Image (cartoon, helix red, strand yellow):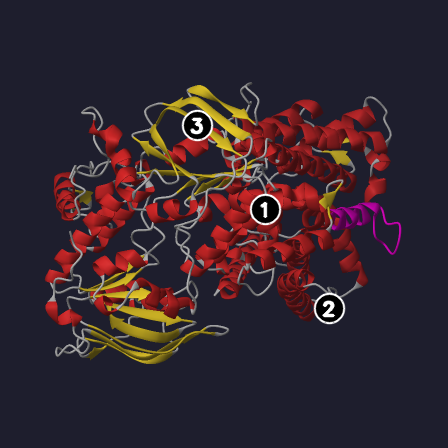
Amino acid sequence: MTSAPSSPPADAGAPPAPALLRGRGIGKTYATPVLAGVDFDLHAGEVLALTGENGAGKSTLSKIVAGLVQPTAGTLTLAGAAFAPASRQDAERQGVRMVMQELSLVPTLSVAENLLLGRVPHRFGFIRNEALDEAAARQMALIGLQDIDPRLPVSALGVGYQQMVEIARSLVGECRLLILDEPTATLTSREIDHLFHQIALLKARGVAIVYISHRLDELRQVADRVMVLRDGRHIDTRPMRALVQADIVRSMVGHDVHEGLDRAVRPRGRRALAVRALGRGSVVRDVSLDLHAGELLGLAGLVGSGRTELLRLIVGADRKDCGAVMLGESDAPARIASPVQAVRAGIGFVTEDRKSQGLLLPQSIRVNTTLANLGAVARFGWLRRDTERRAVEHLRELLRVRSDSIEQPVDQLSGGNQQKVVFARWLHRDCDVLLLDEPTRGVDIGARADIYAQIDGLAAAGKALLMVSSDLRELMAQCDRIGVMSAGRLVRIFERGQWTEQLLLEAAFSAYAAADQPVPQEQPA
Amino acid sequence: MSHPETRARFASAIGTVAGLLAALALMVGFFSWQSEYFFSADTFVTIANDIPAVAVTAVGMTFVLIIAGIDLSVGSTMALAAAVAGIAMLQWHWSLLPATGLAMLTGLVVGAVNGAVTVAWRLPSFIVTLGMLEVARGAAYIATDSRTQYIGSRIDWLGKPIVGGLSPAFFIAIAIVAAAQVVLTRTVFGRGMIGIGTNEEAMRLAGVDPRPIKIAVFALAGLLAGLGGVFLSSRLEAADPNAGTGAELVVIASVVIGGTSLMGGRGSVASTFFGVLVISVLEAGLAQIGASEPTKRIITGCVIIIAVVLDTLRERRKKS
């Protein structure tokens, strides 16, 4: 629906109009340079895709434009005037806004209050609720969220909806330049369509958009030009239509990335885990599945279809209303009332939100890696430091975690490297069953390949893997089977060879077709 | 120092400790300049023999703050434990060692209750221990019959000089600080504490049950407060139901001056010890230059705030 760039001048290699934003020699040096000598032009009404591996400098460049980081070299010009925002607020006053990958919503406040945070309509300090709701509803309608009650607390929404609210918020007030950092990381294809539609409208209004994404197929739909960074340097900027995906990936990483679409089905071993009639309220209903050693079973579905919730039920993070989980080939229900018991039973859980639920951010790679299996590096409760160090060094090399040393705090690592640390933890624990919730969210293509290689290795070692992903291409490329959840039900499990993107999507919508189940946050086509 | 791990830890510890040592040197310099009597062996021995009660209690508090908790009941626990030790010695004619053991056991029970209630109903430890502050104080009054029970020379052995003017209590406190630092940095339990303080949910999902660790930390804090109570008694030669009133604040201040984060996940027992020294030197010095009680309190309060501001700035600089 929004595949073709709608503003003609943006396509041209050298548009006649002066650039809205011009950067010359932009550089940023912390201990080492992360960005050096970057020149770019951004025109009103165009979408400039910014891409590159993690650590390539995308985030730094966009944060400089958004005023979050000050450059150590170079100059910016906004509409002909020097532009050196001292803070995010400063940049926003000049109409430059950024939607961060990490959500910055206040969970306890309502959707409406979040949307208008800092500009809540009031009289003598008392909030004017009607005006607030009205303004919020207008804003939400802009990106097709009119079905959400603006009075709901944000914490009641799933991550996907929260992302949409975040985007809606950035559109409040004047906006000349909008930076979107991985905006689709948690969105389903429906939501992505909504977003692209909104982007097209913004372009028509003359807003310039910087679009950061790892999902190259999306760039084709949304971007006019693509700018590739590598190791902090500007490699190439070209009109989108002159490029094929392989070109972009090649300039990003310097070699072809194996897509694995034609992979063979992995040999399926003994049953490792069985789920029988598992349910919790209307969130997860009557789900049964078998998971075998050596296979990767994917879980597709819309945001809110109960995929994450199913994983949480399996590990006992939430209490189930009914059903059972069986370990191995046993038919006796396992007693798993908490993640602690799940880990003891050999089930590891890589959570979707690695920052709040996965990592000890200020702690080192070493501390994070051995967390789930301290017993292996201790004797009688005493840590054996050499053993620990060797184990972590080994995993760091195996997973190619880009870092100074195993003592580097993980909050200094890029998203892909953080996720590798989470993987390292579970490799160290050596679980029989591993549940992966969006394991490549916010991870660049190069690191993704490393993670897929680890998944392959785990499967080959006889581990049973269950992976939730909102990226259908990823599921189709990696999985042996794909289960599709819809409205809390596991509606179908496809074998490799049976699925197409179309079939998977149809299944994802199927349970919402019944009249009593409105599709969350999305209107029917 | 062959490993980066050791080096990184060393560098970080040096940062905090160096700051604290500089502060100590400044204070000693200032007080020596203001009062000709300050810079003497007597002063330092007095300070050393004054700190054990706060020091051992601060060790437990460091652990509690590292798991992102707080224990407001330690002052009352000190009084209750001292009262129990007093009864054991006066009424049951126990000797010092078993009476001290009983006092520590009392503290352990108080702390375990703090921990168990906090964990079982997922309550903020601030509230639970605030309640316990009253409960334990009341119990101390009941145990002592609301009177200061004079114990006499049978308990003052702990506070009497043995080597170089220093008391057994001082050496015990030093040993406990050293042992606790090792527990924090070298054991699975210590790693668990840091993990809980950093991200409890992540610990749980990684398969580490935070509950027993938390209960153990509070129990340990109680046990050490119990020992602190006995140390306090040995200085007073009595079990005073009002002993340790407000001690929780001095203890928390010492720990925080030592660079332990109130937000949890970061802290060091060794630097807590220097935090205790800072407060004690300040108190002793101010007393010696004749500062009035109100002035002392104002200055101490300011020092606490300045210490935390400096530590926060240092942390932020390290991050960026």
Q: Is residue A227 magenta?
A: no
Q: Residue A137 occupies which quadrant of the picture? A: top left
Question: How far is the residue under mark 1 from the one under mark 3?
Answer: 24 Å
Q: Which residue is mark 3?
A: A289
Visible residue check, residue A178: yes
Q: Earlier in the sequence, mark 1 or mark 3?
A: 3
Question: How far is the residue under mark 2 from the one under mark 3?
Answer: 82 Å
Q: Which residue is mark 1?
A: A427
Instruction: Determine whether A79 is above or below A463 in the image.
Output: below
**SS of the residue under disc 2:** loop
Foreground of the two, B56 or A39:
A39
Q: Mark 2, mark 3: which one is toward the viewer? A: 3
Q: Are marks 2 and 1 on the same chain?
A: no
Q: Which residue is mark 2?
A: B36
In the image, is B258 to the left or to the right of B159?
Answer: left
Magenta stretch, residue numbers: B160-179
Mark 2: which amino acid?
A: Glu
Instruction: Determine whether A4 is above or below A280 in the image.
Output: below
Question: How far is the residue under mark 2 from the one under mark 1?
Answer: 64 Å
Circle 1/circle 3 CB separation < 8 Å: no
In the image, is B281 to the left or to the right of A32?
Answer: right
Visible residue check, residue B259: no
